Image (cartoon, grey):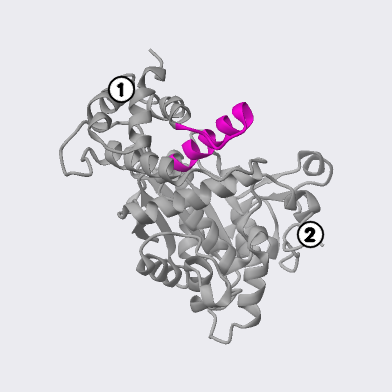
Amino acid sequence: MTALDPTADRAQRPPAVERAQRPPAEVRYADELAALAAGDGDPRPPGWRLSLRAARRFILGDPAAGIRRKFVGDPSLIDRALVALATSRGLMLVGEPGTAKSLLSELLAAAVSGDSTLTIQGGAATTEDQIRYSWNYALLVADGPSPRALVPAPLLRGMAEGRVVRFEEITRCPLEVQDCLLSPLSDRVLAIPELPGADAMVFAREGFNVIATANTRDRGVNEMSAALKRRFNFETVFPIPDLGTELELVEAEAGELLRRSGVTAPPRRDLLEVLVTTFRELRTGITERGDAMERLSAVMSTAEAVSVAHAVGLRGWFLRGESGDAADLVACLAGTAAKDDAEDLARLRRYLEQQVSRRSGAQWRAVHDARHLLPG
């Protein structure tokens, strides 16, 4: 069985994957995927593991069938994303950092291909070899160019096996590196000129496509070429607009992270409400009452709020044996705020002094009392 064998079973993973800190979606939700596939009588696009309806249920949830919701956002976005993947165009997910673009990409790949691990991480040092293929140089020197010496990268594997390839932070890559996707996305073929005969061309099998992600804050870093943009359907992933929905998500995700970290005390709902409200106001520059205020330049996303809630729970549990308090929250906020701009820490201090002092409630008062814990 060669590295390009499309019959290779990637679903059978070693036990180490099961014990990973964060297993891929197809491992975490293996039972749900199996149940959906078993009961899926709807038509499926060629090469797909699930139909569009079943994939939609996997991502958005189906309480009656015991399928939990995994992505909080506009359901029509999921519909458009799935339809895009069923076409010959790739899917580009854009949005602010922390809006769950990578999570959505992972869930889509798991639903369509049963495998979300064919992933390219974009960056300034990413090369075409890391995207397409490279060589085992010992075999290359000994035997010359041959399929045995070929080391397939995610794009080549996805094409040969008919699977979805994820390209994270594509605009972090140099323009000429991004454009190596042009032929695979348009002609569905990848040339390997070093190999002779039929081995010199790899034609994409049914089910192949590309999901790319890009942060709107990175626009202008390495803007995509017009030719490559034409080969993608662009979808914007927006922040969660509703406070209650965001609070429920942060509570669920932070609770799961805390359980994995060995913390048995669940996060406090009243403290999480303060946390989520603070993030929303610092993100938008508008208070709950509708007053304008200073906003932070740092990313105050839902994902960051989950990270802070996780850290608060860890501090409380491992330092004092409880679930975390307002003092932990203030201490953990500093590391989130002071990343991009030194003035952000001063803005956060002014928020705690001026805005938080006007709020009623025990946790708001406790946060105001703990403002001296901010460094500097």
Residue 238 in sight here: no
The residue identified by callout 1 is 349
Q: List the single residue furthest toward the left.
A: 291
Q: Position of residue 296 (x, y in %)?
A: 29, 31
Q: Which image quarter is the C terminus in?
A: top left
- Residue 245 highlighted magenta (yes or no): no
The residue identified by callout 2 is 2
Asked if labels 2 and 1 touch by Cβ distance under 8 angstroms, the answer is: no
Of 313 and 54, the residue lying toward us: 313
Q: Which image quarter is the N terminus in?
A: bottom right
Q: Residue at x 48, y 32 (%)?
A: 325
- The amino acid type of the residue labelled 2 equals Thr
- The amino acid type of the residue labelled 1 equals Arg
Q: Position of residue 295 (x, y in %)?
A: 25, 33
Per the image, label 1 sits on a secondary structure element best described as helix
The boundaries of the magenta stretch are 305-325
Q: Residue at x 35, y 55 (%)?
A: 244
Of 49 and 332, the residue lying toward us: 332
Residue 292 in sight here: yes
Q: Choose top left, top right, bottom left or bottom right for residue 159.
A: bottom right
Q: Choose top left, top right, bottom left or bottom right for residue 4.
A: bottom right
Q: CA distance from mark 1 to mark 2?
A: 59 Å
